[in-house]
Amino acid sequence: TPDDYSVSPPPLRARTSNLVADLKEELVPRSRIPLAVSRLVPKDEVFLFAGNPSRTALYIRLVVNGLLGRPAAVFFAILATSMLRLAGPMAFTMSVVLLTPLILSGLLYLTYVSWKTKFFCITNRQVMVRTGWFAHRIGVAPVHNIQMVNVNSGLIDRWLSLNSICFETAA
């Protein structure tokens, strides 16, 4: 029953002055880190954050690219149709109707891949960003070189619980 106090809750671990050592097992496990990034991080560093941008940011980009990409998809479908020199108005209409969804779905797929291949890691000693689909690029900034951290959030960003974080480094 809920009122049964005979079973005591598990004891809380006491925190020591070395919080990073205490939290080492509770932070991001190395198994969630891409191998290309994990190899660059020494074993004694602790991952404080690791992950892709938020899914909300992905959904917003998909909607915006879907709405703005539709006219571009129609334009490129018309351009491709005129380059193929298909005869007759029916062939032109059918090719535009068939090519527009293909071009738009390709645009949305590239938006998703761009989101999926972007990965951020923050350790107790460095900030890392991995981007790229064919050619992976990894940017590393030691924490001691970071001079300023800008957190930008507009009205809509705050409403959707999003932030844009910019780390500025010396050099």
Image (tube, helix red, strand yellow):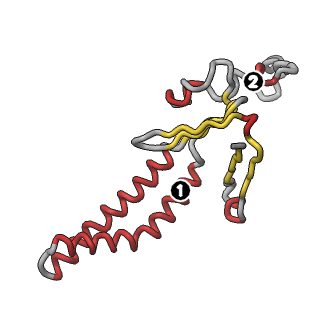
Name of the residue lying farthest toward the bottom: 89
The answer to whether residue 45 is above or below residue 55 is above
Q: Of callouts 2 and 1, which one flags the residue occurring earlier in the amino acid sequence?
A: 2
> Which secondary structure lies at badge 2?
helix
Residue 62: give x, y in percent of width and height: 49, 59
Name of the residue lying farthest toward the left: 87
The answer to whether residue 135 is above or below residue 23 is below
Asked if residue 22 lies left or right of residue 49, the reply is right
Is residue 2 visible to the viewer in this orientation of the structure?
yes
Looking at the image, which residue is at 42% across and 67% down? 69
The answer to whether residue 89 is above or below residue 61 is below
Asked if residue 131 lies left or right of residue 12, the reply is left
Asked if residue 161 lies left or right of residue 111, the reply is right
Looking at the image, which residue is at 30% across and 61% down? 102
| Count of numbered circles on the image | 2
Which residue occupies the foreground of this view, 103 or 8?
103
Q: Residue 158: which disc?
A: none
Q: Amino acid at mark 2?
A: Leu
Q: Quarter of the image holding residue 154?
A: bottom right
Residue that numbered label 2 is attached to: 23
Residue 117: give x, y in percent of width and height: 48, 43
The answer to whether residue 41 is above or below residue 49 is above
Looking at the image, which residue is at 82% across and 19% down? 13
